[in-house]
Amino acid sequence: MLENGLYEQLINQVIDRELNDDKKLIKTRKLSEEGSEKILSRYVAEVVELGLRSCGSMAEKIDLANNLIENIKNQTSQNSLSDYAIATGDGSDDMANELLSVSDKANNVQAVNDNIEVIRPKTSLVESSLFTGSDKEPKMFEELRNEIASADRIDMLVSFIRCAGIRLILDSLKKFTERGGRLRVITTSYMGVTETGAVEELAKLPNTEVKICYETKNVGLHAKAYVFYRNTGFSTAYIGSSNLSRKAMSYGLEWNLKITRKDLPDTFDKVEETFEIYWNSKEFELFRMENRERLEKALEAEKQSKSRIGVDTRYTFDLSPYTYQQEILDKLDAEREVRGYYRNLVVRELPSMIPSLAT
């Protein structure tokens, strides 16, 4: 029985029979060519999962999957699809295997010691999951360490960076950047919470760039994202509420959604594209060690502004000169930069505003 409400579902035979009801007002739309592959594949995946659950053994499940692949190959005349058939072993206990990692044997301790395991996240690389700070889940900073160990490139977007938060993952980031991994970090001076020392610790790392947004009034960056790119294509990202602070990373009641490129490719692409937009925006400035004083002043100004909230009213607005004012400013700039004259007097003649006293 279909409940009243919204749907976004392909109409199958079961639903079609239920829709034959004169008492119901039904709205449908034609399946368009654009995007139909995703819609159909998502539906077929649901049906395939139902079919696989009814299989009695692993061998039957693999046979069903390979038969489906064979049928698709025959229907589409794409012979290359045969290469996607699941490889099976010779024994009954070795019917199928999942590939977990690939690495060079040269200078690899794992080549001589099978007991050393490859560091990998405890959560899946293909299925999205939610972190809520529960004791049943890995700690956020622990899982980030595991992600860092296997990443090829990392982007971080956080409002605040604290020294105590950085220390939780700093050793992992050092190893990552020293082996050639590229790290990019975007943060802000918002509310004066970020610590200069934490920014410096990151900026000291090789292959690392840190950009800061000083214009916090208009930009209002409050996003948090940790993105781990892997050349294998099994990239992951954490998006939620955790800044780089000890509380947020370890015991705070923070929610962070882990998304995977395999599970949500369109969403992952949007994360990557949006970060690039921010990174190339003039609102975000590259931090250098010689900029320490500027960062400290910006953080102090934010703290003072925060302390005055409720005491006085502050207004934010943009100032730009009128055309005649810009002309004067350009002439002043020329006098100073070209001729070296820094003592200038600007006089503008105004029409008389004195009322006439004539009688």
Image: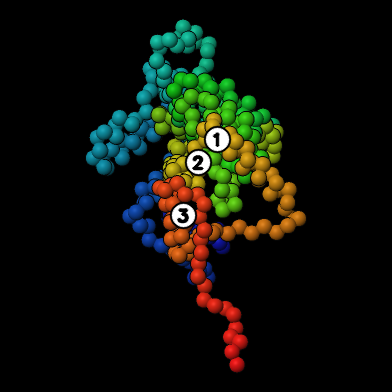
Q: Secondary structure at mark 2?
A: strand
Can residue 20 be seen? no
Foreground tag (2 vs 1): 1
Residue 57 percent location from the top left of the image: 47, 28
In the image, residue 124 above or below residue 319: above
Identify the residue at image location x=54%, y=40%. Answer: 212
Q: Are marks 2 and 1 in contact (CB under 8 Å)?
A: yes
Foreground tag (3 vs 1): 3
Picture quarter with the C terminus: bottom right
Q: For the residue marked with disc 2, what is the amino acid?
A: Glu
Circle nearer the N terminus (3, 2): 2
Real-space Cα separation, disc 2 to disc 1, in angstroms: 10 Å
Which label was assigned to residue 285? 2
**Way the structure is coloured:** rainbow
Report crowding for label 3: few under 14, some 14 to 19, many 20 or more residues within 10 A (C-alpha). some
Judging depth in this view, the residue of 154 and 3 nearest the camera is 154
In the image, residue 348 above or below residue 231: below
Circle nearer the N terminus (3, 1): 1
Query: Would you say 12 lies left or right of 356 here?
Result: left
Which label was assigned to residue 332? 3
- Residue tagged 1: 291
Identify the residue at image location x=52%, y=72%. Answer: 350
Q: For the residue marked with disc 3, what is the amino acid?
A: Leu
Q: Secondary structure at mark 3?
A: helix
Real-space Cα separation, disc 3 to disc 2, in angstroms: 28 Å
Q: Secondary structure at mark 1?
A: helix
Judging depth in this view, the residue of 176 and 186 nearest the camera is 186
Circle nearer the N terminus (2, 1): 2
